[in-house]
Structures are given as C-alpha cells and as structure tokens.
Image (cartoon, rainbow, N blue to C red):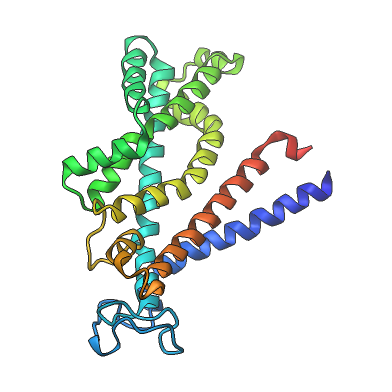
C-alpha cells in the first residue's frame, strides 16, 4: 500500500510538472517561436519537415512549429479561462441553491435541468452560431452549457455541510450567512469541485477546438489549434503534416491534463491515504 501511495505521488508530481510546463510555455509562446508565426513566404509554401522547419510550412509558407507554439497561448489560455468561469459560476449557483433552498433552489435547478437535457456540444453549436461565432462567443457558448454540473456538485455538498452538527454550532455562535459560506462551507466543498475542474480541462479543450474546427471559434489568421486544422483539412492527402501538427498538439495537451486530473482524483480518494 505504501508503494502504491508513493507511486501515486510520483505520478502526481510528473503530470503536474508537465501541465505547468505547458501553461508556462503557452504564456511565453511569443518568445519561444523560432519564426514569426504570421510571416508568409510563398517560395517555401507547403514544404515538408526539414531541419530549418521541423514541422514543415503551411500553404502560405508560414513555419508550422511557430504556428503551433503561438496557438498554444490561444488554445490553453482560452480553455483555462473557460474552466475557471464555469467552476466559479456553477459553484456560486450550487451554494446559493443549497444554502437558501425554497423557490430559489427550485427555479435554478430546473434551469440547470434544461441545459442538461440537451447534448452539450450540439447545444454549444446552436448558441455559438446564434452569437455569430468567434473565440469569445465560443467560450460563452460552452460556459452556458457546462456550469450545471458544478452547480449540482456544489449544491449536494452544501446541503451535506449545512446539516452537520458543527455548522449548527457555528450558526449558534452568531456568524452571519456570508461568513459561514466563505469560511466554513466553501473550504470544505472545494475538493470534489476542483477535481472535476481538472478533469474538465481536457474536455473543454477538445470542445473549443471542435467549435473552431467547425468555424464557430477563433478565426484565421489567429493561430488556434482547432481553426488551424479546419483551415488545412483540404491538404490532408497532399501535405498531411500541416494538419497533423496542431492535431498532435491537441492530443498531447489533452492527454497531459486528463492524466493529471485522473491522478488528482485518485490521490484525493481517502482509500489511497490508508
């Protein structure tokens, strides 16, 4: 059991380090690109990978490695922003429902049921399409359909905390509702919510890329992995490296964040601490 716990801790350190490295590299991407990601050179258009251009060039002669690195900032930062928004909004709604109860709980939970009744990506396509597309609207569309899960978790956790003996003692001590929520409820319910958020990063990244691939996310020439794949899908048979490069970047990033989320979930499991 101790060996298993040490192995789990090692995995957590490794995947956390890889995730942090991805975030740092995306943040400083403009300093890591070997070429200007927007610089066009038609003389080397659709050039296969070489030592000068390890991932080749696209139809306009732009270096694909630079495009992929620059695209990491858009893709990863947008995903983290989206997950932060849905976590904050969903948690706030869930805590209010669990704490207040009554008609407020009924109305907000029925609204969440409406959002949960539709297939997520299909609903996001409809919302993003009605808003006119664009990266900002894609984030809004995915946020609109993703918050109910967090609201459900926060509500159930708040209800369980609200009825505990020690919470009744805190209430008798004279603490107000706001103080009780921020000092006693939120710290005790954030564990499951943060684990869910970590597991959602990979999913949200895929869904953002999907919306961009379908033309409802980032617009060219902004380097974003999903839109880069969409813009070059017609070249799959003649110049596959142009489409594969951002696809591999998505695969690696999603895999790292999913493995990190799985490891955090296992590490947070009380059985793993015995």
Q: Is residue 72 above or below residue 149?
A: below
Residue 72, located in which quarter of the rendered image? Answer: bottom left
Front in this rendered view, residue 245 or 84? 245
Percent from the top left, x then y, of residue 207? 38, 47
Percent from the top left, x then y, of residue 219? 22, 60
Residue at position x 51%, y 38% from top? 196
Q: Is residue 1 above or below residue 231?
A: above
Front in this rendered view, residue 229 or 102? 229
Residue 259 lies left or right of residue 234; in this view the side is: right
Q: Is residue 170 visible?
A: no
Q: Residue furthest top?
A: 102
Residue at position x 43%, y 83% from top? 49
Q: Is residue 202 visible?
A: yes
Total number of numbered labels? 0
Q: Residue furthest front?
A: 237
Percent from the top left, x then y, of residue 150? 44, 32
Q: Quadrant of the C terminus?
A: top right
Residue at position x 36%, y 62% from top? 225
Residue 69, located in which quarter of the rendered image? Answer: bottom left
Residue 155 lies left or right of residue 168; in this view the side is: left
Front in this rendered view, residue 99 or 271? 271
């Amino acid at each position: 059991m101790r060996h298993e716990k040490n192995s789990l801790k090692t995995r957590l350190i490794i995947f956390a380090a890889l995730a942090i490295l991805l975030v740092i590299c995306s943040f400083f991407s403009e300093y890591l690109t070997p070429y200007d990601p927007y610089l066009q050179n038609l003389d080397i258009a659709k050039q296969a990978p070489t030592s000068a251009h390890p991932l080749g060039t696209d139809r306009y002669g732009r270096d694909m490695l630079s495009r992929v690195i620059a695209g990491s900032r858009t893709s990863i930062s947008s995903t983290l922003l989206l997950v932060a928004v849905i976590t904050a909004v969903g948690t706030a709604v869930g805590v209010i429902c669990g704490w207040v109860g009554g008609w407020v709980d009924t109305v907000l939970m029925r609204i969440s049921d409406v959002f949960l009744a539709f297939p997520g990506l299909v609903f996001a396509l409809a919302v993003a399409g009605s808003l006119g597309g664009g990266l900002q609207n894609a984030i809004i569309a995915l946020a609109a359909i993703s918050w109910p899960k967090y609201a459900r978790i926060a509500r159930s956790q708040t209800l369980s905390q609200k009825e505990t003996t020690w919470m009744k003692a805190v209430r008798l001590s004279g603490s107000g509702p706001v103080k009780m929520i921020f000092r006693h409820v939120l710290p005790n319910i954030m564990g499951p919510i943060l684990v869910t958020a970590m597991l959602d990063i990979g999913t949200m990244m895929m869904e953002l890329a999907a919306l961009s691939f379908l033309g409802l996310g980032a617009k060219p020439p902004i380097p974003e992995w999903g839109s880069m794949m969409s813009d070059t899908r017609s070249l799959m048979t003649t110049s596959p490296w142009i489409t594969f490069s951002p696809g591999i970047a998505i695969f690696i990033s999603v895999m790292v964040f999913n493995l990190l989320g799985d490891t955090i979930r296992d590490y947070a499991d009380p059985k793993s601490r015995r």
